[in-house]
Amino acid sequence: MEFNEHKPIYLQIADTLCDKILTGEWVTEDRIPSVRELGVALGVNPNTIMRTYDHLQSIEVIYNRRGVGYFISPGSRNSIIKIQKEQFIKEELPKIVTRMSLLGIEPSEVFNCK
């Protein structure tokens, strides 16, 4: 995994794990890799993975069964969609609209509206 220097690594990893849920690769109640397993697989410090897992737990995407591991929470897909839609509308869409305006691009050109 290649990391972007403009966003914390733990959030980039969280985004990747959320993508696995959105694509259906991971589903509700699936056990996900342990902190150590994922750290080794991605070549990052286990503390970074723990921070990722803490973040995902705080937004109720995963949960921990003590002594067993981490699992995908019921409703995680809907939670991710809600959070990412809000982020897109608040952070990314304004940049796109501004860029379209600067370049003189009409929405109909992008969305093939007739």
Image (spheres, helix red, strand yellow):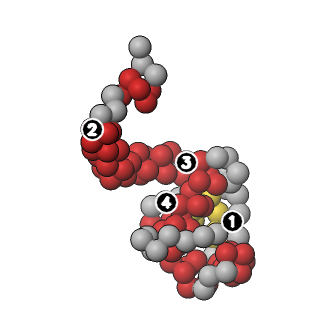
- Depth order, front residue of 52/44: 44
In the picture of the structure, the residue carrying the numbered disc 3 is: 77
- Depth order, front residue of 57/11: 11
Marks 3 and 2: which is nearer the front? 2
Query: What's under tag 3, amino acid-wise?
Result: Arg
Residue 58, by quadrant, is bottom left
- Depth order, front residue of 74/12: 12
| Distance (Cα) linking label 2 and label 1 | 43 Å
In the picture of the structure, the residue carrying the numbered disc 2 is: 101
Sequence order check: which comes first, mark 2 or mark 1? Answer: 1
Instruction: State whether residue 67 appears in this view.
Output: no
Q: Picture coordinates of residue 9 (x, y %)?
A: 51, 74
102 relative to 51, above or below = above
> Along the horizontal axis of the image, is 104 left or right of 68?
left
In the picture of the structure, the residue carrying the numbered disc 1 is: 32
> Along the horizontal axis of the image, is 55 left or right of 101?
right
Sequence order check: which comes first, mark 1 or mark 3? Answer: 1
Marks 4 and 2: which is nearer the front? 2
Query: What's under tag 1, amino acid-wise?
Result: Ile
Q: Residue at x 43, y 30 (%)?
A: 110
| Distance (Cα) linking label 4 and label 2 | 38 Å
Marks 2 and 1: which is nearer the front? 2
Q: Residue at x 42, y 19 (%)?
A: 113
Q: Picture coordinates of residue 103 (x, y %)?
A: 31, 39
Q: Quadrant of the N terminus?
A: bottom right
In the picture of the structure, the residue carrying the numbered disc 4 is: 60
Q: Which mark is residue 64?
A: none
Label 2 SS? helix
Q: Residue at x 42, y 71 (%)?
A: 6
Query: What's under tag 4, amino acid-wise?
Result: Glu
Q: Quadrant of the C terminus?
A: top left
Q: Picture coordinates of residue 80 (x, y %)?
A: 49, 51
